Image: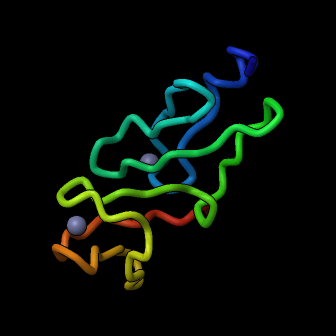
Amino acid sequence: MINQELLKILACPFCKTVVRLESNTLFCTNKECGCQYAVEDDIPIMLIDQAKRSCPQCGTQRDWVEDKDLIVCPQCQTKIEYKPQV
Ligand SMILES: [Zn+2]
Ligand SMILES: [Zn+2]
């Protein structure tokens, strides 16, 4: 079980929104972002390139085209702003 205090300070590395734990997966609470992070041996894997990211419009998983500070869904062209970690 992940420490609740740790959970409070965890944020999605993709959009900086707080995450919510559900059945060993951390879900970004930002619906526009929709990133999911696995938890392995009680350690959250908060890495953008390890995240599952499904398109809020069409559900396409990852393989989004990164275009500077935008990520574009190849399926429906939905754009999500990308805020890289500083
Ligand atoms: Zn996010
Ligand atoms: Zn899409």
- How many marks overall? 0
* Residue 27 location (% of width, % of height): 48, 37
Quadrant of the image for the N terminus?
A: top right
Quadrant of the image for the C terminus?
A: bottom right
**Image point 45% across, 52% down: which residue?**
15
**Image point 77% across, 39% down: which residue?**
40
Q: Is residue 73 left or right of residue 29?
A: left
Which quarter of the figure has residue 53?
A: bottom left
Figure colour scheme:
rainbow
**Image point 18% across, 57% down: which residue?**
57
Camera-side residue: 69 or 47? 47
Camera-side residue: 41 or 83? 41
Which quarter of the figure has residue 9?
A: top right
Q: Is residue 40 left or right of residue 68?
A: right
* Residue 63 location (% of width, % of height): 43, 76
* Residue 79 location (% of width, % of height): 24, 70
**Image point 64% across, 43% down: which residue?**
38
In the displayed orientation, state which residue is furthest to the right: 41
Q: Is residue 26 left or right of residue 83?
A: right
Quarter of the rendered image showing ligand 2? bottom left
- Above or below, 26 against 78 in this view is above
Which quarter of the figure has residue 4?
A: top right
- Above or below, 1 against 45 in this view is above
* Residue 59 location (% of width, % of height): 27, 57
Q: Is residue 61 left or right of residue 11?
A: left
- Above or below, 51 against 30 in this view is below
